[in-house]
Image (spheres, rainbow, N blue to C red):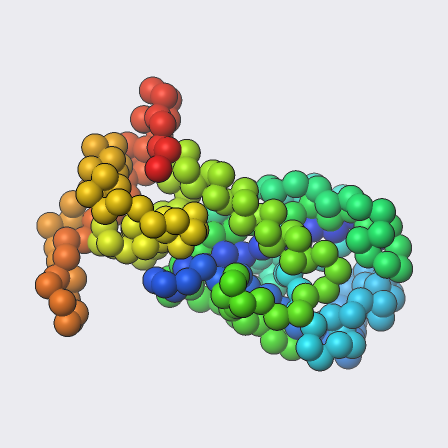
């Protein structure tokens, strides 16, 4: 049994080296019916999707999410959603807030707990479940038509990310395993929508001792090859206990 008045939505952010993107999906009622046909919540789910514009409006997109089963907490269900709908496991996941405006869903009262996840699309193999018609990345500055208040949820998640990225190195989850200082700076400039002084940024980052020089350089690049670094999670955890200030 699912809780028809409580749902979870996941804002999945990905960075392609130049743009911050969000992963959205489309579905349709027949696909949902087929996917849930042998599931105990088949009746409830199909009735809800009959009312959901994502299953009838071919131009509408939505965040990946679902209603919460009565015997699951929201955190575990958010992880389940990521794993089931996209095959993403062990990704960075943080709760944003609850969205509880009375008329946010027109056909019934629904409180949604939103989460944001950070991934590097080049290093995660995603697959869409059978109930999904389309699964696609969109630039956050060029969004399609989305259902309900999902544009507001995405904006709130972005503000949460911007707040946290200034004090904690969460942005590293959007980078490849080995990256250049330029790639790191581009990431922070994209998330924060600001231009950072290169010299000051690099000095501050390197002084934190959070990066490990791999003693390798880029290959097959048209410009001068830059050094490649890795993020040292053990050092970060140690510095957090000692009072790390990661403010950019």
Q: Nearer the viewer, residue 194 or 38?
A: 194
Q: Is 132 located above or below residue 232 in the figure?
A: below
- Residue at x 50% of width, y 45% of height: 161
Q: Position of residue 64 (x, y in %)?
A: 64, 61
Residue 82 picture quarter: bottom right
Q: Which of 44 and 139 is in front in this view?
A: 139
Q: In which quarter of the image is the C terminus?
A: top left
Whether residue 1 can be seen here? no
- Residue at x 23% of width, y 47% of height: 198
Q: Nearer the viewer, residue 167 or 34?
A: 167
- Residue at x 50% of width, y 65% of height: 139
Q: Is 138 located above or below residue 67 in the figure?
A: below
Q: Is residue 92 left or right of residue 129?
A: left
Q: Nearer the viewer, residue 132 or 111?
A: 111
> How many discs mark residues in the rendered view?
0
Whether residue 111 can be seen here? yes
Q: Position of residue 87 (x, y in %)?
A: 53, 62
Farthest top residue in view: 242
Q: Where is residue 50 in the image (x, y as percent from the top left)?
A: 85, 70
Q: In this view, does 110 lie to the left or right of 189?
A: right
Q: Is residue 232 left or right of residue 187?
A: left
- Residue at x 81% of width, y 60% of height: 41
Q: Where is residue 194 in the image (x, y as percent from the top left)?
A: 39, 49
Q: In this view, does 75 lie to the left or right of 188?
A: right
């Amino acid at each position: 049994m699912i809780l028809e008045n409580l749902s979870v939505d996941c804002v999945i952010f990905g960075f392609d080296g130049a743009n911050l993107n969000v992963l959205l999906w489309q579905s349709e009622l027949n696909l949902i019916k087929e996917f849930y046909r042998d599931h105990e919540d088949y009746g409830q789910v199909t009735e809800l999707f009959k009312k959901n514009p994502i299953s009838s409006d071919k131009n509408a997109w939505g965040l990946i999410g679902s209603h919460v089963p009565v015997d699951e907490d929201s955190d575990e269900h958010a992880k389940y959603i990521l794993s089931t709908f996209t095959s993403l496991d062990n990704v960075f996941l943080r709760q944003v807030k609850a969205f509880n405006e009375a008329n946010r869903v027109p056909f019934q009262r629904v409180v949604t707990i939103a989460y944001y996840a950070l991934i590097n699309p080049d290093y995660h193999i995603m697959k869409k479940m059978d109930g999904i018609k389309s699964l696609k990345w969109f630039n956050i500055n060029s969004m399609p038509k989305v259902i309900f208040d999902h544009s507001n949820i995405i904006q709130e998640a972005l503000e949460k990310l911007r707040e946290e990225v200034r004090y904690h190195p969460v942005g590293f989850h959007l980078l490849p395993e080995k990256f250049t200082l330029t790639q790191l700076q581009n990431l922070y400039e994209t998330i924060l929508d600001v231009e950072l002084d290169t010299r000051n940024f690099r000095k501050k980052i390197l002084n934190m001792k959070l990066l490990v020089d791999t003693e390798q350089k880029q290959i097959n690049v048209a410009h001068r090859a830059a050094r490649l670094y890795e993020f040292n999670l053990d050092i970060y955890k140690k510095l957090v206990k000692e009072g790390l200030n990661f403010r950019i």
